[in-house]
Image: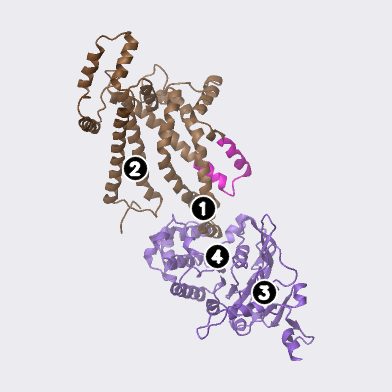
Amino acid sequence: MTESKEARHPVLKVRDLKVYYETPKGDVLAVDGINFDLYEGETLGLVGESGCGKSTAAMGILQLVVPPGRIAGGEVLLEGHSLLGLPENMLRSIRWIKLALIPQGAMNSLNPTMKVCDQIKDVIIAHEGKRARKDIRQRILKLLATVGLPGRVYDMYPHELSGGMKQRVCIAMAIALNPTIIIADEATSALDVVVQRIVAQTLLKVKQALGVSMIMIGHDMGLMAQMVDRIAVMYAGKIVEIAPVADLFANPRHPYSQLLIESIPSLKERKPLKITEGITHDPRNPPPGCIFQLRCPFVMDKCRVVAPPGLEVKPGQIVACHLYQENKDGSMVNVANAAGNT
Amino acid sequence: MGGITFGYLARRLTVFFLTIWISATLIWLIPRVAPGDPISAMVARMTRQAGYVENSDVIIEGWKARFGLNDPLPVQYLRYLGNIIRLDFGYSLAFFPTPVNEIIGRALPWTVGLLLVAITITFLLGNFLGALLAWRQTPRLIKYIIPLGMIFTSIPSILAALFLIYVFAYMLDWFPMIGSYARGMQPAFNMEFIASVIKHGTLPALSIVLVSFGYWTLGMRGMMVTVEGEDYMHLARAKGLNPFYVLYRYMVRNAILPQVTALAITLGTLVSGQVLVEYIFSYQGMGTVIFTAIRNQDYTVIQGASFFVIVLTALSVLIIDLIYPMIDPRITYERK
């Protein structure tokens, strides 16, 4: 976490990724040109409100976008190799070995007509070929133990498990082949807080044990604060801010990030929820300029015309907002504050 | 698996016998409510044959006494139930000294055989095509051809039967028009006889398959589309499994379950749909027996044949019910 950025090497590069859904009234720009790197061994959080394109972004990375969705542009580079346009059989051999998924809604993510062991076994056999039955059994039992499940789960069907147990089966499945990257798509959101805690701890434990790179998608800011190294805030298909988690919580720069963090309920005081003010634009027809202009409390004329480029306001903290400008000497200035001070 | 307890089995068997008892009662009741009765039908038949029947009153009274029709209804009913338990349906009225059981015994194996083959082919073919129709990787050409084959679904089975007879028996002369096996052949367990049975059974079976497989195709397609949207399909694709494996182990395996339920529900219709088809092909099964009996007002045969068809249907539903927990692990009849 404290390593310098230069020393780390990115395992996944996402460049200008666009995923659109086709509708009779035009394309929904679910993911509209996102950029980020995922470094080896790090956990990147991807947060944002429902419908902002978090899960779609994950599907874009996994090359699992299904019609009416399509990848409209951009690049996904896994260890330097582009995933886009790879034929399906090539993709299939990469899947789960390089990119594993802990699905959203683990309640229904397991095949109801297959035993837990068979569902873990099939992915092992698909990628490593047939193995001795005894070896596979030992391996699956070990995986179940890693995620804190008892051995009797091995022979059980999904409907015999609780939600938290199913989610942990999914985690065990995700680490079965020691993947390079795990994408956890709202892995804990369908669970109550107690089970959430157990699953989150399991995830942390697994991550520390394997040193795997992880993208955690979610909207629980509190959970994110504890789980991730860096955090990317998404709004309406774009990443508006990306920063080390401590920096983002201590000093969120983008107005949307500020609102998100303010919205975390406090035990000490009751405060009005600000984030609901304003409306989100029609995702088929985004306004010119900044994507957040309709809800932004600091909106300026410039925001309605020019889309803000990403600006590194602090090492590792990139914000897409006209409020911040680079001075000639390379220092950063907050336009709003600067105007107020002089 | 195999989560069937004695308790469940006992309950399910009770329902089975209850169904049969209620149907038996209805079979007994309906002729007594409907106009006409077996004896006047028989006298009418004799009159037709002989022109005039002497002392018909005496004959009628004699028969009434012999059949016990002068006894109070509850007594008749209990006697009828007693007979049914012993599977004794008396004698055919139309072919008098022949017992009903003999007529049914000759016809039942043919019907069971034809039905079993036709339903199995219909179910497998229909679901297979339905799965292909919904699967993303299916070649587009196949997706266009399958619906064309389903045109027959909208026409009645008798018309399909006539069409098949015209094309394959009359025009092309590939298959015989009528019968269950070549005339003059002695039923025996040899290749020649079996070949003849298959040849004669093809068109009747085909006319049942043609008109009913579309039902399964459409149902299966719908179920497959539903399964396609399930979260576990998403995960299956992310796992990078072989697409054929995903098709049968994840999609078909789950989509087929409601189809099996539907099979149990529609079995009764399938059986009754076969009556006319058998008659058209003069196939010596229960359908022909029932049809002939209705024409001859052969009450005892109608009673016996209906009863056996009902037992057949109830038995099939019972079997499907009992194997269901083996194909769907979520259904167990075990109380833990």
Horizontal and vertical percent for residue B336?
A: 31, 59
- Circle 1 sits in a helix, a strand or a loop, which is it? helix
Q: Name which residue type carries label 4.
A: Ala
Q: Name which residue type carries label 3.
A: Arg
How many angstroms separate mark 3 from mark 2 (CA)?
63 Å
The tag earlier along the polypeptide, 4 or 3, is: 4
On residue B318, the disc is 2
- In the rendered image, the vertical position of residue A51 relative to residue A221, given as above or below: above
Q: In the picture, one chain is purple; tell me its letter.
A: A
On residue A295, the disc is 3
User: Numbered disc 1: what chain?
Assistant: B
Image quadrant for the C terminus of chain A?
Answer: bottom right
The tag earlier along the polypeptide, 1 or 2, is: 1
Q: Nearer the viewer, mark 3 or mark 2?
A: 3
Q: Nearer the viewer, mark 1 or mark 3?
A: 3
For residue B94, say whether it is visible. no
